[in-house]
Image (spheres, rainbow, N blue to C red):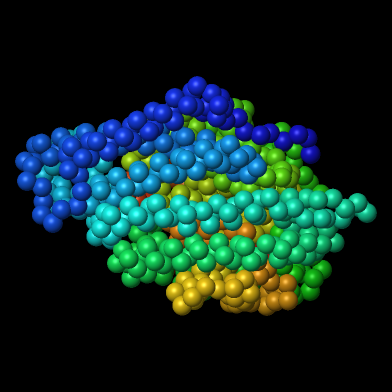
Amino acid sequence: MTTLPRWNLSKIYPGLDTAPYRAARADYEQRLTALEARFDQYDICRVENSPSTNDADLAARLDSVLRQLNAMLLVGETLGAFLYGLITTDSYDTAAAKENSQLEMLGTRRQQLEVRLKGWLGSLAPRLPALLKLRPELQSHRFFLEFTAAQSRYLMSEPLEALAAELCLDAGTAFGRLQGNITSQLKVPFERDGVTTELPIAMVRNLSFDPDPVIRERAYHVEQKGWESIRTTVAACMNGVKGTSLTLAKRRGRPGVLEVALDQNRIDRETLDALLGAIREFFPVFRGYLRAKANKLGRGNQLPWWDLFAPVGSAERRFTWTEARAFIVAKFSSFSSALGQFAARAFDEEWIDAEPRVGKRGGAYCMPVPGVEESRVLANFDGSFEQLMTLAHELGHAFHNDCQRGLEMLRRGSPSTLAETASIFCETLATEAALPTAAPAEQLMILEAQIAGATQVCLDISSRYIFETAVFARRGEGELSADEFCELMRGAQSETYGDAVDPATYHPYMWLWKPHYYSHEEYFYNFPYAFGHLFGLGLYAVYQQEGAAFVPRYMELLRDTGQNFAAPLAERFGLRIREREFWRGSLRVIEGQIAKYAALK
């Protein structure tokens, strides 16, 4: 591999110890203070009866508050993105960690304002239709206003919400940060070609894609020992985060944490049950793929865990960074010139941090940087086709962000379900465009990457959902040990993978390194991936029928994902996501790919 790029954060701010950063930091605090004063002036808080202010004045006040809030969020989210970019690529950066801690403390003040606003909007709920008519400027925020008003019934009193915001810095947030730091800094000894070196755990995990089966198996065992060395500490983090989540849900009058996740993802239980039920029906299909892969690798009828990501087909093909850029830009351009040009810009303007290194977190993510209307993509690129698809996936997120360019902050974003829409679409686009011109061996490699990804978001995501459901149930009775977490993870993997994967090689520490489990504010960050993957496939099927006419409608959908529930957005394309048959349709696409894969030699 040639030298891989690190992203450029200087366009956001030149550095922590620079005048632009300090000015932005001061500006954020000043805007926050001014907004607090405005809330006090307008007496914005939850009241038993609707405020006595007349409708015209009330509409003007609401418009003023939303304008100030949007401006404050623009500065705050940009600061947060800059600091997150620093600490996730260098967990040894104590200055950035300290700044981030101070920003989080300001965040508790912001949370308190959000609680007050939510309570106030709940009090205004009966009057919102009249206010929207009086002030057309409010119409663009209709969804935010109505959704926030509806969610206000799950608030504790303002003093308790304020206390919770402060305590969570020392509970859920701190535990999540500790998990990230300890896993990113872990190094393990790994022997290759007679030479033993200390490698970051993220690099060892990447060896699961290595063509050499001996290396893959050795990496698996080294990884297990590495996780074992920190499991007690990370188990404490899991207990702290999940305990915080349960306490907050109970105090806020929620029937359970799953209901919180459904609201956060703007879907209902009917949709979730249809999704998970359809996936469960297709467990045998995915197990059939695993058995076919085991056969192709000479493993008989059962795959060891360390071969889940083993390359099949043209395994010797590796991509340089230049080749990765050319591949993605070409495939994206086949959909639209705008998407291709966007991808080229991300590569050329240093939006991507691709180099694995000590102190950098594993995995991949994309974050918006609203102050400069750009994104930043973190990857750990090793030249494999799987990592190439990860880049396509994350650049899909970045394109989604770009489609929301110019929107006010309260209208941006997506629930986690819809956040995967563009990423899965772009990943599918890249693989489908590559297949027709590929030789049989390369077709096998491409299908392998595509199906392995689908298996992750159906079988593995199902195991994560089963695991997290069990953890919340058990955590309500008391803390769990690392052994108990491992036991629950093995049980979840048995329920999903079955004996298509050798049970003796299950990965009991999947709970330890996945950051998705370690947020006290986001629960069940697993089923949204399955939703996004299958929803993306459904949209891709529509694109195949409509061709170029699909592109502007698709971009409009991406622009609106922060401003509606999932079902109405899906209905624009005739997709009925509350029905199991819709999800079966997407799963049949994968079933067809698996049949083609099994037939290839």
Residue at the spot 56% in from the left edge and 46% down from the top edge = 365
Residue 569 seen in this snapshot: yes
Which of the two residues, 77 or 218, is positioned nearer the viewer here? 77
Residue at the spot 62% in from the left edge and 71% down from the top edge = 482
Q: Quadrant of the N terminus?
A: top right
Instruction: Tell whether 299 sits left or right of 89.
Output: right
Residue at the spot 49% in from the left edge and 46% down from the top edge = 422
User: In the picture, residue 306 is in which quadrant?
Assistant: bottom right
In the picture as drawn, the residue positioned furthest to the top comes out as 19
Tell how many labels.
0
Expressed as whole percent of the image width and height from the top left, the position of residue 519 reads 49, 56
Q: Is residue 41 above or below residue 585?
A: above
Which of the two residues, 589 or 355, is positioned nearer the viewer here? 355
Instruction: Tell whether 214 sits left or right of 551.
Output: right
User: In the picture, residue 194 is in which quadrant?
Assistant: bottom right
Expressed as whole percent of the image width and height from the top left, the position of residue 586 reads 50, 61
User: In the picture, residue 168 is in which quadrant?
Assistant: bottom left
Expressed as whole percent of the image width and height from the top left, the position of residue 368 reads 48, 38
